[in-house]
Image (tube, rainbow, N blue to C red):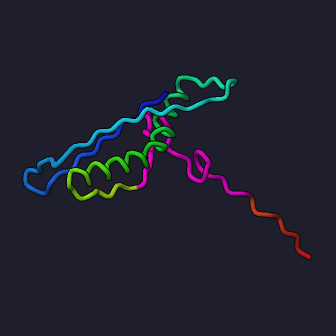
Amino acid sequence: MVEVSFEYSAWDSAEPPQRLFLVNCAFEVSYQMRPDHAPTEEEISSFGRGTAVFNCWPYAREYLRDITARIGHQTPALPLLRIIPKRSDTAPPPAIGGMAGKPELPEPAATEKP
């Protein structure tokens, strides 16, 4: 069982801004694994922060649309979900083109003169 929570705040354009409303929602999601699969704690945590959030996002968007319509506010446009992993301070920079470090170019093919 994984719990996924979302929070959305809407503010007016006054100075200083005033909160119009705050919506919190949480989903409990249950997944079934193969009996022979035993994930590590790190894998379970990663799954909860990534896949489970991604799976719940459409329901959170619909809930926000429904609740704001019920209270008479214009429905905010929420984007499609894009999960950006946090980088640790010790992690190397992301590889470009799937290669870590400096990419190596292939040696040019030898050509024979006739």
Task: Examine the rendered structure and indicate whether residue 58 appears above or below residue 25.
Answer: below
List the single residue furthest toward the front: 70
Viewport quadrant of the C terminus: bottom right
Task: Examine the rendered structure and indicate whether residue 104 appears above or below residue 112.
Answer: above
Instruction: Locate residue 56 relative to residue 6 in the image: left or right.
Output: right
- Residue 103 is one of the magenta-drawn residues: yes
Q: Position of residue 83 (x, y in %)?
A: 45, 46
List the single residue furthest toward the left: 15
The residue depicted at 41 percent of the width and 46 percent of the height is 59
Q: Quadrant of residue 74?
A: bottom left
Q: Quadrant of residue 7?
A: top left
Closest to the observer: 24 or 69? Answer: 69
Q: Position of residue 60 (x, y in %)?
A: 38, 45
Instruction: Locate residue 83 relative to residue 66 in the image: left or right.
Output: right
Instruction: Locate residue 40 relative to residue 109 in the image: left or right.
Output: left
Marker count (numbered): 0
Task: Examine the rendered structure and indicate whether residue 92 appears above or below residue 34.
Answer: below
List the single residue furthest toward the bottom: 114
Instruction: Name the magenta segment's main secondary structure.
Output: loop
Q: Position of residue 108 (x, y in %)?
A: 75, 63
What residue range appears in magenta?
Answer: 80-106
- Residue 108 is one of the magenta-drawn residues: no
Closest to the observer: 88 or 86? Answer: 86
Task: Examine the rendered structure and indicate whether residue 13 appears above or below residue 41.
Answer: below
The residue depicted at 32 percent of the width and 53 percent of the height is 65
List the single residue furthest toward the right: 114
The residue depicted at 55 percent of the width and 29 percent of the height is 43
Q: Position of residue 40 (x, y in %)?
A: 58, 23
